Image (cartoon, rainbow, N blue to C red):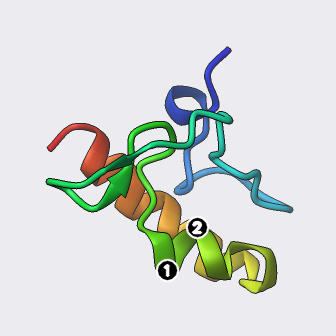
């Protein structure tokens, strides 16, 4: 199971899981984490974000994964 491929922000209900895989390395060319595909501002605000904001971040992650 890999949360990045298994989680669907469009259909999932309830609390939104963190996309963190504990592979914390920034891709400086894309300015995202190579593990979770989040930007530093997204990582920073994750713990205080609402579930809807987290789903929005997940949508960005899904886009970045296949970009």
Could you say which is closer to the camera, residue 39 or residue 15? 39
Q: Residues within 10 Å of mark 1 (few under 14, many from 20)?
A: few
Q: Position of residue 1 (x, y in %)?
A: 68, 14
Structural distance between the alpha carbons of marks 1 and 2: 15 Å
Furthest residue to the top? Answer: 1
Q: Position of residue 47 (x, y in %)?
A: 79, 75
Q: What's the residue at 27%, 50% (across, down)?
A: 64
- Note whether 18 is above or below 2 in the view shown: below
Task: Please say if the residues under marks 1 and 2 sit with CB atoms less than 8 Å apart.
Answer: no
Q: Residues within 10 Å of mark 2 (few under 14, many from 20)?
A: some
The residue singled out by tag 1 in the image is 41
Q: What's the residue at 46%, 42% (across, down)?
A: 25
Left or right side of 33 for 42: right
Could you say which is closer to the camera, residue 31 or residue 58? 31
Q: What's the residue at 40%, 54% (across, down)?
A: 61
Q: Position of residue 11 (x, y in %)?
A: 60, 51
Q: What's the residue at 49%, 37% (across, down)?
A: 35
The residue singled out by tag 2 in the image is 55
Q: Is residue 56 visible?
A: no
């Amino acid at each position: 199971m890999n949360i990045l491929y298994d989680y669907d922000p469009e259909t999932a209900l309830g609390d939104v899981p963190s996309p963190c895989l504990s592979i914390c390395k920034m891709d400086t060319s894309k300015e995202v984490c190579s593990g979770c595909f989040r930007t530093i501002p997204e990582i920073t605000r994750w713990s205080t974000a609402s579930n809807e904001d987290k789903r929005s971040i997940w949508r960005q992650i899904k886009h970045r994964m296949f970009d």
